[in-house]
Amino acid sequence: MKTIQLSEKELATLKAAVWAQIQNVNKDIRFAQEQGKNISFLLELKKEFEQAFEALKYAN
């Protein structure tokens, strides 16, 4: 794994993109629940995005 340097703007952009994906997955979860579909993979995806977002909080 490599370490990269990001500007504040780049880091903010990454955080915003991951946050938007979390919101999209939340929407997909609600839609799937309304249709009675299995949402386990969506919950796992949401968890992974949330972990990525948490990691970005500690980035310099």
Image: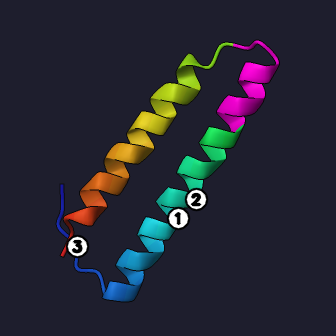
Type of amino acid under label 1: Ala
Q: In the figure, is residue 45 to the left or right of 28?
A: left
Magenta stretch, overall SS: helix
Q: Are marks 1 and 2 in contact (CB under 8 Å)?
A: yes
Q: Residue at x 19, y 64 (%)?
A: 58
Q: Are marks 3 and 2 in contact (CB under 8 Å)?
A: no
Residue neighbourhood size for the residue with mark 2, other residues' Cα within 10 Å, grouped as few (<14), some (14–19), many (≥20) = few
- Give the labeled residue for mark 3: 4
Q: Secondary structure at mark 3?
A: loop
- Give the labeled residue for mark 1: 17
Look at the image and give the residue range highlighted in magenta: 28-37
Q: Secondary structure at mark 1?
A: helix
Please provide percent x and percent y for residue 50. 39, 45
Q: CA distance from mark 1 to mark 3?
A: 18 Å
Question: Per the image, is 32 magenta?
Answer: yes
Type of amino acid under label 3: Ile
Question: 1 or 55, which lies in front?
Answer: 55
Vertical placement of 1 versus 28: above or below?
Answer: below
Q: Which mark is residue 20?
A: 2
Q: Quadrant of residue 31?
A: top right
Question: Per the image, is 1 magenta?
Answer: no
Q: CA distance from mark 1 to mark 2?
A: 5 Å
**In what quadrant of the picture does the C terminus appear?**
bottom left
Question: 7 or 20, which lies in front?
Answer: 20
Vertical placement of 45 versus 14: above or below?
Answer: above
Please provide percent x and percent y for residue 44. 46, 27
